Amino acid sequence: MSEMQYVTEQDFQQEVLLSPLPVLVDFTAVWCGPCKMIDPIVKQLAQEWQGKAKVVKCDADQNPNILMQYGIMGIPTIMLFKNGAVAERVTGYQPKEKLAAKMAAHL
């Protein structure tokens, strides 16, 4: 499985907000237990949605301004951006079926 792309405050606008495809962003941190649990699910969705959506990660500790901008208080938070706007948002661990169903409606 290929390594996940990480976005930062420097490239968030280009990679996420200006993307022609919907972008699923996994806001995560290395010390976060539930983030580790959701990681394989996010990687599976990245493979399954290839060509339909872009899937990236954002390190919560290294990009605090993005978290403040979107009012993210807990991680993992998964957000789907479509045409530069938040289309869907889920905070906390979700099983793959639930997460995919919520996000797939926007693809």
Image (cartoon, grey):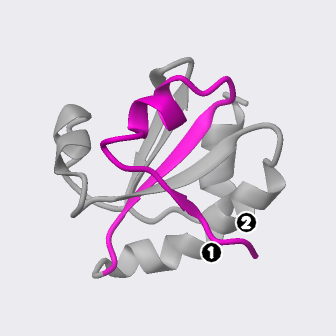
Residue stretch rendered in magenta on the structure: 1-30
Quarter of the image with the N terminus is bottom right
The reply to whether dot 1 and dot 2 touch (C-beta < 8 Å) is yes
Towards the viewer: 30 or 45: 30
Q: Residues within 10 Å of mark 1 (few under 14, many from 20)?
A: few
Residue type at numbered disc 2? Gln
Residue under circle 1?
40
Give the quadrant of residue 82.
Answer: top right
> Any magenta on residue 24?
yes
Q: Residues within 10 Å of mark 2 (few under 14, many from 20)?
A: few
State the image coordinates of residue 69 (x, y, percent, origin top left): 21, 33
State the image coordinates of residue 22 (x, y, percent, origin top left): 64, 31
Quarter of the image with the C terminus is top right
Image vertical order of residue 105 relative to residue 98, above or below: above
Q: What is the distance, in whole Å, between disc 1 and disc 2 at their CAs?
A: 6 Å
Label 2 SS: helix
